[in-house]
Image: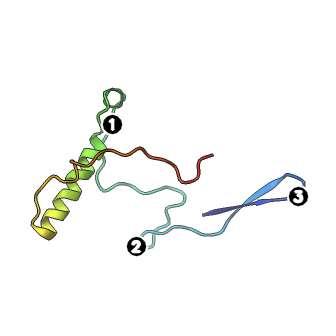
Amino acid sequence: MNTPVQFSDGSGLIITTARWFTPKGRTIGDVGITPDIEVPRTVEQIAQGQDPQLEAALDVLEGLIGAATGITDTFLRDQQPRAYVPANPG
């Protein structure tokens, strides 16, 4: 995590104040996280409003919920999509 510091002359500095680690102790700051399941998404799919990454995530979640509870309904897919709004735009 980086913390910006603003000086009175208008200049600034960004200081690394924390690092993020996976449960296995690996830092993710330099390389990010490799997904367990990689699902490509093409420009054509985006243009057509298709989201295979979301569909794959729902498959995984529904499988986990079904395994834990016995519920095999597709209730997650029945939810209305919501727009992503960044918490701190700008």
Q: Report which residue position mark 1 lands on.
A: 41
Q: Are marks 1 and 3 in contact (CB under 8 Å)?
A: no
Secondary structure at numbered mark 3: loop
Residue furthest front as drawn: 80
Which one is earlier in the sequence, the residue at label 2 or at label 1? Answer: 2
Q: Nearer the viewer, mark 1 or mark 3?
A: 3
The residue sitting at 58% across, 52% down in the picture is: 88
Judge from the rendering whether residue 30 lies leftward or rightward of residue 67; answer left or right. right
Q: Report which residue position mark 2 lands on.
A: 23
Q: Is residue 45 above or below residue 30?
A: above
Residue 27 image offset from top left, x and y in percent: 50, 66
Q: Is residue 46 above or below residue 30?
A: above
Q: Are marks 2 and 3 in contact (CB under 8 Å)?
A: no
- Mark 1 burial class by Cα count in 10 Å: few <14, some 14-19, many 20+: few
Q: Quadrant of residue 69?
A: bottom left
Judge from the rendering whether residue 39 lies leftward or rightward of residue 86; answer left or right. left
Amino acid type, callout 1: Arg
